[in-house]
Amino acid sequence: MIEITLPDGAVKKVPKETTPMEVAKSISEGLARNVISAKFNDTVVETATPLTQDGTLTLYTWNNDEGKKAFWHSSSHVLAQALEELYPGIKLTIGPAIENGFYYDVDFGEHTVSEKDFPTIEKKALEIARGKHDYKMRSVSKADALSYYNEQDNEYKVELIENLEDGTITFCDHSTFTDLCRGGHIPNTGIIKAIKILSVAGAYWRGNENNKQLTRVYGISFPKQKELTAYLELLEEAKKRDHRKLGKELELFTFSQKVGQGLPLWLPKGAALRERLEQFLKKAQKKAGYEMVVTPHIGQKELYVTSGHYAKYGEDSFQPIHTPKEDEEFLLKPMNCPHHCEIYNSSPFSYKDLPKRYAEFGTVYRYEQSGELHGLTRVRGFTQDDAHIFCTPDQLNVEFKKVIDLSLYVLRSLGFENFTAQVSVRDLDKPEKYIGEPENWEKAEQAIINAAEEKGLNFVIESGEAAFYGPKLDFMVKDALGRQWQLGTIQVDYNLPERFDLSYKGSDNELHRPVMIHRAPFGSMERFVALLLEHTGGNFPLWLIPDQAIVLPVSEKHEKYAEKVLNSLENHEIRALIDNRNETVGKKIREAELKKIPFMLIVGEQEEGSETISVRRHGGEDFGSISINEFSDLVATEINSTLKSF
Ligand SMILES: [Zn+2]
Ligand SMILES: [Zn+2]
């Protein structure tokens, strides 16, 4: 008999060679029907793998990320079989699961594949899936594995096998198809009920542009047809909300090849929006006891050698800037922290002076590979809403709670209600991975967990996920399309205070090391605006949106009155513009709708006579004719309902 421990701590005694699927069955038939993948002692196993020793077993369904991974990886085998049957002589390379779906990189030889072939591939793949073929793993010797793929003339698989150790090589069979594979499959192909080929793209073998270019076929699959339909609808909606598209339409930002890739240029409306976001956070930070600091965009190379950032970013990033003076080198700053440490170091502090909270909208530069760049979410220069808190270990819990309060305030003011948190702590089995005193770690981890509990956060604890220099808390936000984004990290750091020799005088008159907290509720202004665009589809909260209203005179005759209305709106601090083109009101309304301007103020004969405006809300709601004062109250009420004071 062996002892199987389940995630809830329950222990099951089962005969040796029992499989994960049999364990599932012994728990409930319902569970067994849904189990598609399993992990035994931190290793992914097949649901049919006989278990031969004591250990911890986790069973996964479609509702777990691990389950989806097995589902999609298994689907890539089905795709590969379909491609091989449709295009004889092609060479298969690798086919992993990805965040949403899977791909297979294929050398199609003389064949070409394009969008028009997708339905044929999907049909073939689904036909194979319906055969309910079991996935079966088997060990093969290196020699047999090599000869199998040499016979097929597949130099890619041969290269992969050559780098593997004899005795560790496994093949996976299903139906008539065999693939080199480490494992991690669903029980059989019949569980795959819907398959969609999403796109094809070029991809170099092993990601190296000196190698041959292969064709990457992207696909996704589901256990129910209706889930595929919902996913495709989501994709359509995501396309409409793509921040790169909306950023252009709403005239927020642009890129110039002349300025350089990954370096966003903020247009007037975007810059003003960013300014409002900054002011919003500055105001809250001031109340929370932060002090603003300003530091330069570059620093001496030595600064980053001290901080350790040179070792991390130096080689693969922007290279040092040289000056006429020999041996003088500066770096574009990849992080603001070293500068803030030196600000802390500029004056002596006692425990009574702490905490010190230094905040800066600091622009940093990191050299992302050009293939990694993506709109505003992956850029080479970005501004962090950065702050560093220097405190005593005893202050950590209170400071952490304050940062949580501020982060929640930021998220809620911007319409994010759906969020969770993750607390990342040490792996207690690997103490060598972490710097700093274990008792400080213990204290910090407990401080974070207590803070998260006291603030009523919905959080999980992930052991082994902490950075080598300290534990942290991340907020995970779900956007309107249900996609998860990591936003707002609060990180404890024992490393930089050590490296910069930071100290404060304690009540015992001795020098002590402060603890440092890094935090950025937005993350970066660039990424946050991108996320906000995709979350709201450009319908920003009223307090933030570039143009809150547009005045639409029905004819030239009413232009003067329209100007007067605009003036009056400005006096009420409402951001508005005017459309006095010689067009019909209907057309002006349609265009204002497209620009997502929240309020359309129509002025004609009747409005001019009664000194009113006819107010129409984006989307169609009609407020009738009201005075400007009444409209101003309407705007103020809506703003106050989302933007509470901190
Ligand atoms: Zn596989
Ligand atoms: Zn920092």
Image (tube, helix red, strand yellow):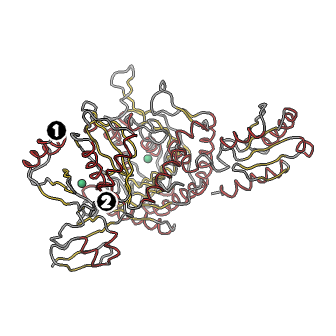
Residue 492: in sight, yes or no?
yes
Give the residue type at disc 1.
Glu
Please report whichever mark, 2 or 1, sits nearer to the chain's N-terminal start. Answer: 2
2 or 1: mark nearer the eye: 2
- At 34% from the left and 69% from the top, the residue drawn is 34
Where is residue 161? Give x, y as percent: 14, 45
Q: Quadrant of residue 209?
A: top left
Q: Which mark is residue 354?
A: none
Judge left or right: residue 534 versus residue 83.
Answer: right
The residue to which callout 1 is attached is 155
> In what element is the residue under mark 1?
helix
Quadrant holding ligand 1? bottom left
Q: Quadrant of residue 62?
A: bottom left
Judge left or right: residue 51 versus residue 523.
Answer: left
Residue that lies at the very extreme toward the top in this rendered image: 324
Dot 1, how many residues are within 10 Å of its Cα: few (below 14), some (14-19), or many (20+)?
A: some
The residue to which callout 2 is attached is 130
Residue 390: in sight, yes or no?
no
Ligand 1 within 8 angstroms of badge 2 C-beta: no
> In what element is the residue under mark 2?
helix
- At 78% from the left and 39% from the top, the residue drawn is 585
Give the residue type at disc 2.
Arg
- At 33% from the left and 71% from the top, the residue drawn is 33
Give me the C-alpha separation between circle 2 and circle 1. 31 Å
Where is residue 633? Give x, y as percent: 79, 53
- At 39% from the left and 38% from the top, the residue drawn is 372
Where is residue 249? Give x, y as percent: 60, 37
The one nearer the camera, 459 or 502, is: 459
Residue that lies at the very extreme toward the left in this rendered image: 143
